[in-house]
Image: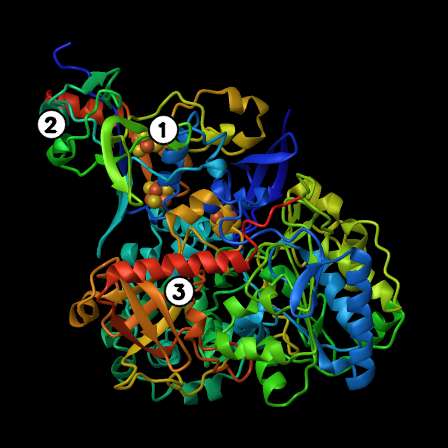
Amino acid sequence: MENKVLTVCPYCGSGCQLYLLVENGQVVGAEPADGRTNEGNLCLKGHYGWDFLNDPQLLTSRLRKPMIRKEGVLQEVSWEEAIGFTAEKLNAIKEKYGPDAIMGTGSARGPGNEANYVMQKFMRAVIGTNNIDHCARVCHGPSVAGLTYSLGDGAMSNSIPEIENTDLLLIFGYNAAVTHPIVARRIVKAKQKGAVLIVADPRKTESARIADTWLPLKGGTNMALVNAFGHVLIEEELYDKDYVSNFVQGFDEYKANVEKYTPEYAERITGVRAADIRKVMRQYAKSGKAMILYGMGVCQFAQAVDVVKGLASLALLTGHFGRESVGIGPVRGQNNVQGSCDMGALPNVYPGYQSVEDAKIRKKFEKAWGTSLPDKTGYRLTEVPHLILKENKIKAYYIFGEDPVQSDPNAAELREALDQLELVIVQDIFMNKTALHADVILPATSWGEHDGVYSSADRGFQRIRKAIDPPGEVKPDWQIISEVSTAMGYPMAYKNSEEIWDEMRKLCPSFAGASYSKMEALGGVQWPCPSEDHPGTPYLYQGNRFTTPSGKGQLFACEWRAPLEQPDDEYPLTLSTVREVGHYSVRTMTGNCRALSQLSDEPGNIQISLEDAAEHGIADGQLVQVYSRRGHIMARAQVSGRIKKGATYMTYHFWIGACNELTVDYLDPVSKTPEFKYCAVRIEAISDQAQAEALVRKQYAELRKQMLVGAVPE
Amino acid sequence: MNHAASNSLVIAEAAKCIGCKACELACFAVHNRDNGVGTAVGTVTMPVLPRLYVIRTDSFTMPVQCRQCENAPCAGACPVQAIRQQDGVIAIDAEACIGCKACALACPFGAISLYKAYSGGAELPQPLLQERRDSRLQRKTRITAYKCDLCRNTELPGGSAAGEGAGGRGSSAAAAQDRNPFPACVAVCPEKALRLVEAGTGRSRSLNREGGTF
Ligand code: SF4
Ligand code: SF4
Ligand code: SF4
C-alpha cells in the first residue's frame, strides 16, 4: 500500500512542501507539492534527499540506542540509565559550579520548533541559565542583530513569492543557485519578467552570470561598497526626502559617516568601478519596487552587523519598505534556522523575540513556567571554546542536533575544548564528529519520523508530519528533553507537539494565532499572526511603522575595517567557505543519500583560479594540500575561470577536506559570528597523485569505521 | 508533405539554468527504474550515470544533450549499426554496442559517453575479455554508449508528472499511473530551463515553413 504524507523539505530555508511516498513503512520516494514558496517544484535535494532515512551507512550510521562513555568507550545502555546519568551529572554540575557553567544548543535542523521551545525552556527554567544558542550564531546572527536594530525584526521583510514581481533585485554576497535553488527560481523569473538584476559578489555566481550588472568586489570590502552606495544616494539626492523625514532616524550622522566614501575612494578599496557604483544606485533609487537579498557573503565577516545595518539603510533611504515586493531579505540557510530563532534558542530572548532583560516579560514566563528565571543574557555559541579553555567557565555542554566540530571554525581548538569538559551530551540522529567527544549520546527521531512545525526563511510556519516509524529505540527530541527535565526534578509531560505549540502561542503575541488547524487549512502561516482570525503577514512594516522602540527605521554607517587575517608570504591566498548544491550543512543527511553522495564525495573541492593553478602546477581534479595557521587538509582542486586570482573557496560539507580545520575563529564584536569568509591559506601540489588518492580512500575508510558504519543494526 | 517529420529534442535555456543538476539525477533515475534502482534514485547501488551533462564555463551554465540529429553523424560512424532512428529518436541498442567510441568522437556536441553497463544494479560482465584487477584475472565489465533517448511516456520516479502550470499535481492520486508527456529532465527542472521541442510543432514548425528542410 502506497501512502503519501505531506511535509516540508528538511534542507534549506526555502521551505518547499513535498509528499513523502511511503510503502510498507519505508519511504520510497518524494514528490513535489504545491507549497506557497515552491509551487510544485523541488531542487535535487528535495527530490532525492530522503534516502538517509533508510540508514544506508554511506558516511555514518544512525544512532539507535543511548550510549554512555565507560572507561573511554561509548557503550550502549538503556534509556533509563542514560536519562538518569544525564540528569544526575547536570544536577551535580549545577550544584557545584552554578547554572551558568552549563551551555545548551537549539537545533536549526530536523527537530522543529516544538523541540527548540522545550530545549530553551529546559535551559532557562530547569538549569536556570540563558546559556542557550544555536548555529544561527555562525550564519545569520548578524541579520538578527543588525535588522533588529535598523527595522525591529531580524527576518525577511518580504516573502519569497514576492521576489519575482519586483522591478530591481540587488543581490549581495548571496549565491541563491547553490544555497536556495527554489529561491533562485524566483530570481530567474524576476529577470524574465524584466527586473533589473544587480549582483555584488567576488565570484561569478549563477546570478552574477545572468545579471545586468555584476560588481566583482574584493573579498572583505563589503562595508566600503555599501557606504559608497549610501554616499551616492545622498550626494546625488536620490534618496526619498519625505520618507526619511517621516519614518527614519539618524540621517545627519549617517550622512557624515558616508561622506568620505566617494565611489572613487571605494573603487580603490573594493575594485568595483566607480561608474558602476553610481549607475546601480541610480537604478536602485529610481525603481518603483526594489528588493535586497543577501546571504553569508555579508554575514560571515567580522564586520557583518555593520554591513547588515548598512544594507537596511539603503532601503530606508529610498523608502523601499512596507509594500509588496520591496524590502530586505536575509535568506536563511538551514531549513529551520528561522524557527530556532523564533523559538528563543538565543541567549538574549525568549520565544517570540521577547527580551530576557525585560522584567515584565520575564515575570510572564516565570508565571507560566512556575519558576524564577535568570535576567542576564547568556553565552554565545562561538564564545564557548574560549570560555572553556581560557576562562574555565563552562563545565557541561548539551549539544542538540548540531555538529560543531564540523561546522564551527578552528576545529582543533573546539575538539580540545570538548575534551576538557566534565560532561558533553550529544543528542542527534547520526553519529558525527562531535559525538566522538561525547560522554552520553541520546538518539532522536529524524525528519520524517515526527510531527512539528518549521519556519521557512520568510517567516512561514509550516507543518511537518510523521511518515514512518523510527528505528531502534529512538525518541522524539522534545520527549528526551522532557524526560531529562523530569529526572532533574522539574516535571514536563507533554502528550504531543501540538500541546507544546499551544503553550508557546499563549506566551508569544506575534505567533498567537498560528494554530495547527490554521496551518492545516492555509498550508502555512507567516508571522506576525497575533490572533485566530488574522491571516498572517506576507510583508512587514505596513504603513512604514517599524518595530524598533521609536517606531522609526534607524540609519547606520561606520568605517570599513579590513578582515583580520591578511595573506602574507607564507599564506598568500585567501579562503572563503561556501556551500554546494547537492549537499547540506555537515552532510550527515545528504552524505547518506546515495545519489547525492555520488554526485560529489570526499575529500571535497577547493575552487582556485586558472592563474593560481598554473602557478602551482595544479591540474583540475588533482588532490592538493591546503595549509593555514591552524591546520592542514587534503582537497581536490576545482580550477575555474569564475574565481579571481588570490582567492580560494571550499565547501564545509566534507569530512576529509574539512575547511574548518583551516578557518579562523575571529568574531564579529556584536553578533559573535566568525569570519568564515576570510582567512589566509597556502596550497601545495602533490606530486604522487596515486598515493594521495590511496591515502584519501584509507582516511575515508577509517573515518567511517569511527562513525560506526558497518556495525550491524539490530 | 514536402518535408520530413523532424525528430523532437530537448533544449536548454542558459538564461534560466542555475546548474543545480536536478536534471542529471532525474535522467539517471528514469533510466534505471528496472535496474535495481527501485522506485526512486534513493535505493541506487550503482554510479549515477546521466545522459545529459551540466557544463559550466566562465560565461554560461547549461546542460548539453543529444540533439537527435536528422542525419545523425553518430549513426554514420557506428561500425555495427547499433544506432537507429526509431520513433523520432536516435536510439542506441546497448546490446549491439561494442564500445568502440566512434559515435562519441563523431558527435559534434559531446552528447555521447561510454560507461560501464549495469544490470540489476550490478556491473554487466563482458563475455570473453578478462582484465587484471586486484592482482587477479577477472571478467572485464561491458562498456556501452549512453545518450539521451528522450525518455518520454515513461513513468517518472515517484510518479510525478510536470509541466508549466501543473501546480498541485502531487495531490492527484492518479498521477502515479499517468504516463509522463515530458522527458524526466524537463519535468524536474525547477527553473523550467529545459524545453521539449516537439517534432512539427511550435518553433520547429515555423522553421519548417521558413527553411523547408528542418
Ligand atoms: S533543499 Fe531547499 S530548495 Fe531544495 S527542495 Fe529543499 S527546501 Fe526546496
Ligand atoms: S535542472 Fe534545470 S536548472 Fe538545474 S541544471 Fe538542469 S537545466 Fe539547469
Ligand atoms: S530527455 Fe530523458 S534521456 Fe534525454 S536527457 Fe532528458 S531525462 Fe535524459
Q: Three-letter amino acid code at disc 2?
A: Pro
Secondary element at image label 1: loop
What amino acid is found at the position of numbered circle 3 in the picture? Gly
What residue lies at 47% left-to-right and 59% top-to-bottom? Answer: A702
Horizontally, residue A674 falls left or right of residue A94, namely: left
How is the model colour-coded? rainbow
Q: Is residue A16 left or right of residue A206?
A: right
| Chain that bears disc 1 | B
| Label pair 3/1, CB-CB below 8 angstroms | no
The amino acid on which the numbered mark 1 sits, given as a three-letter code, is Pro
Q: Nearer the viewer, mark 1 or mark 2?
A: 2
Q: Chain of mark 2?
A: B
Determine which quarter of the picture holds residue A603.
bottom left
Q: Which mark is residue B183?
A: 1
Q: Position of residue A548 (x, y in %)?
A: 63, 75
The residue beneath circle 2 is: B73
Chain containing the residue with disc 3: A
At mark 3, the secondary structure is loop
Q: Residue furthest top?
A: B1
Using the image, determine if residue B178 lies above or below residue A457: above
Mark 3 to mark 2: distance in Å?
43 Å
Q: Nearer the viewer, residue A386 or A342?
A: A386
- For the C terminus of chain A, the quadrant is top right
Residue A424 in the image: state x and y as whole percent. Answer: 67, 71
Does residue A173 appear in the picture of this structure? no
Q: Which residue is mark 3?
A: A657
